[in-house]
Image (cartoon, rainbow, N blue to C red):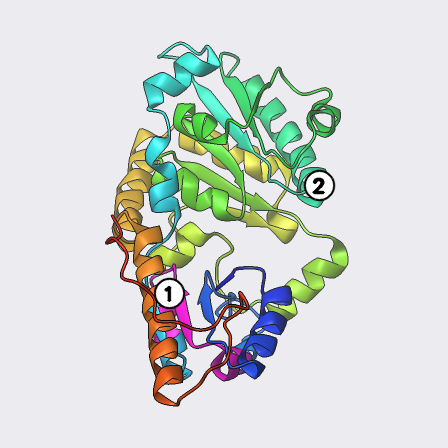
Amino acid sequence: MLIDFPEFNLRLARAARRARVPVVYFIPPQIWAWRGGRVKTIRRFVSLVLAVLPFEPPLYRRAGVPVEFVGHPLVDALAGAPSRAAARRELGLPDGAEVIGLLPGSRREEIERVLPVMREAIARVAAARPVARFVLGQAPTVERSALERHLAGAPPVAILPHGAHAVMRAADVALVTSGTATLETALLGTPMVVCYRLSRLSGVLARLLIRVPWISLTNLVLGREVVPELHLAAATPERLAEETLRLLGDPAAREAQRRAFLELAGQLGEPGVGPRAARLVLAEAGAAMKSAWEEGSHAAPVSGHPRTPAAPGPPLQ
């Protein structure tokens, strides 16, 4: 069973199929965004794709790849997120405070390119709305010192380690680096502005290779621009501040995003994504085992023990 990380996992899939081991791919490569030719490799070496986005199954079926939609794991991962009131208590924020959340990403390169833009943008927001509070969700892969260095000279920003979900819930508007965080923010119901910056070379390659009209998963799943996106030349402090102030000053615009987020939640599947995926993996393994027995195979499984029929286990809850 492969999970994400296609650069390594597609090589592993090739080796597994050569060893006559069936391959199930959970969270498959984003062939819909770029490097669509990888679907040929997937068709050759992957027995079953477990899709997590609703528009993926038709793409794989058209390419002749067996696929099942199991839903997005965030549906379950966010079940324990705090309520808005609890998140504000955790952050020490009054109920009526105007709060802007910063989610600058989880990789060093993202922090270096995006956080300075956010810093300059919130300086402009603070000048226009002096009572606004700013909170930042620190990813576990990012050092606090890096955040503090890029925030130098900004209005006061409370940094919350491992508290991205609390920041998303507590904020009136969130500034979010494009990635999975846009889906998390949407599912938690917080209006947002999405931004992303690339190096000059990466920007040129992106224009040439990326085949989708939006960069945020929220807009991609909904099939329309619900949240503003600022990337490449548009990702400037001035534009980011402008979009943030527009949302802060327009309750109708924030409510329109929240309504769209409810629609998004309905498209990402029901809770229980893990058990659904596990049942399909077990079914694939069972079918392979039955086929091997019918062929009279006595090959040892991966563990090295003789192949024996699996005893029925308890049903997955």
Q: Which residue appears at 66% of the width and 29% of the height?
A: 120
Q: Residue furthest bottom?
A: 295
Q: With 5 as the anchor, is 258 left or right in this view?
A: left
Q: Which residue appears at 39% of the width and 35% of the height?
A: 191
Residue 311: x and y in percent read 30, 63
Q: With 74 as the anchor, is 202 left or right in this view?
A: right
Q: With 83 as the anchor, is 238 left or right in this view?
A: right
**Labels 1 & 2 near each other (Cβ < 8 A):** no
Could you tell me how far apart the alpha carbons at marks 1 and 2 are, in whole angstroms? Answer: 35 Å
Looking at the rendered structure, the number of numbered marks drawn on it comes to: 2
- Asked where in the image residue 122 lies, by quadrant, the reply is top right
Q: Is residue 48 magenta?
A: yes
Q: Which residue is mark 1?
A: 281
Q: Which residues are magenta?
A: 41-59
Q: Is 274 above or below relative to 139? A: below
Q: Which mark is residue 81?
A: none
Q: Is 196 above or below relative to 91? A: below
Q: Which residue appears at 38% of the width and 33% of the height?
A: 190
Q: Which residue is mark 2?
A: 108
Residue 110: x and y in percent read 66, 43
- Asked where in the image residue 256 lies, by quadrant, the reply is top left
Q: In this view of the protein, can residue 107 be seen by the observer?
A: yes
Q: Is 81 above or below relative to 45? A: above
Q: Is residue 53 magenta?
A: yes
**Amino acid type, residue under disc 2 in the picture:** Arg
Residue 270: x and y in percent read 25, 50
Secondary-structure class at tag 2: helix
Of the pair 73 and 30, the residue shown nearer to us: 73
Of the pair 192 and 48, the residue shown nearer to us: 48
**Amino acid type, residue under disc 1 in the picture:** Val
Residue 114: x and y in percent read 65, 40
